Amino acid sequence: MWISPKFHLVVLRAFLEMYEQPQLEEPKATPAQKQTIKNAVHQATIRTGRTHQNIWNVAHTQFGINEIAELKAKDYYRYLDFVENMQPKALPNPTNQLTIPNAGRWFVVVDDFGNVTHIKNLEGKSIISTDIYRKLRADARATADILYEIAHRMEVVDGQCSLEQFNTPILNIANFNL
């Protein structure tokens, strides 16, 4: 019995359509779920001392994704549970012992792994708080503004400025607090 090639093609296509279902993409986590995860990551940074980047990297690796947008809705609760139960990163025991050459005040910087990265002798140096430094810096700027204004007012002698500028006290111009 002879079968037409056209009929044969129609039968083959119908057969393939029956067995080849289009692959539906699995639903992704909703924006509200993603926000909940972001909040959980922030809380985990506070609780564990890990960085945001570290928590994201560990969780993404665990779930085989590159970014939170790829998280499938079915994995949402497991991902959230993973982040909420993340433990602090254990710091390795420092292998190098810090040796201070002599007594005194020293500035020492130690990295996350217990390695000394910088050491400086502070003998004979004054240490002040950053708040005091900022106040001193603001006072220096105000003083510079006052000196500039005095120099500008001296131009009245040469007739290069008006006498009206003397109506405003210098301290009001520089916002200087005595």
Image: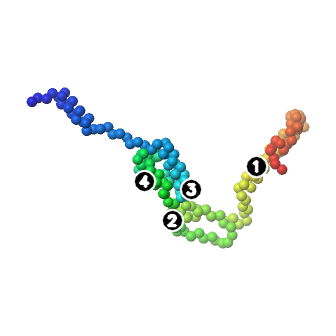
Q: Which mark is residue 18?
A: none
Callout 2 crowding tier (Cα within 10 Å): few <14, some 14–19, many ≥20: few
Q: Going 52% across and 51% down the picture, which residue do you hit?
A: 40
Q: Which residue is mark 2?
A: 92
- In the image shown, does 41 or 163 lie closer to the viewer? 41
Q: Residue furthest left?
A: 1
Whole-number angstrom distance, CA of label 1 to CA of label 2: 43 Å
Tell whether label 4 touches label 1 (CB within 8 Å). Answer: no
Q: Nearer the viewer, mark 2 or mark 3?
A: 3
Residue 6: percent from left, percent from top: 19, 27
Q: Which residue is mark 3?
A: 46
Callout 3 crowding tier (Cα within 10 Å): few <14, some 14–19, many ≥20: few
Q: Which residue is mark 1?
A: 138
Q: Nearer the viewer, mark 4 or mark 3?
A: 3
Whole-number angstrom distance, CA of label 2 to CA of label 4: 22 Å
- In the image shown, does 41 or 58 lie closer to the viewer? 41
- The quadrant of the image that shows the N terminus is top left
Q: Is residue 155 visible?
A: no
Is 1 left, or right, of 136 in this rendering?
left
Q: Nearer the viewer, mark 1 or mark 3?
A: 3
Residue 152: percent from left, percent from top: 84, 39
Regarding mark 3 in the picture, which secondary structure is present there?
helix
Callout 1 crowding tier (Cα within 10 Å): few <14, some 14–19, many ≥20: few
- In the image shown, does 33 or 25 lie closer to the viewer? 33
Q: Amino acid at mark 3?
A: Ile
- The mark nearer the N terminus, 2 or 4, is 4
Q: Which residue is mark 4?
A: 62
Is 178 left, or right, of 132 in this rendering?
right
> In terms of image quadrants, where is residue 12?
top left
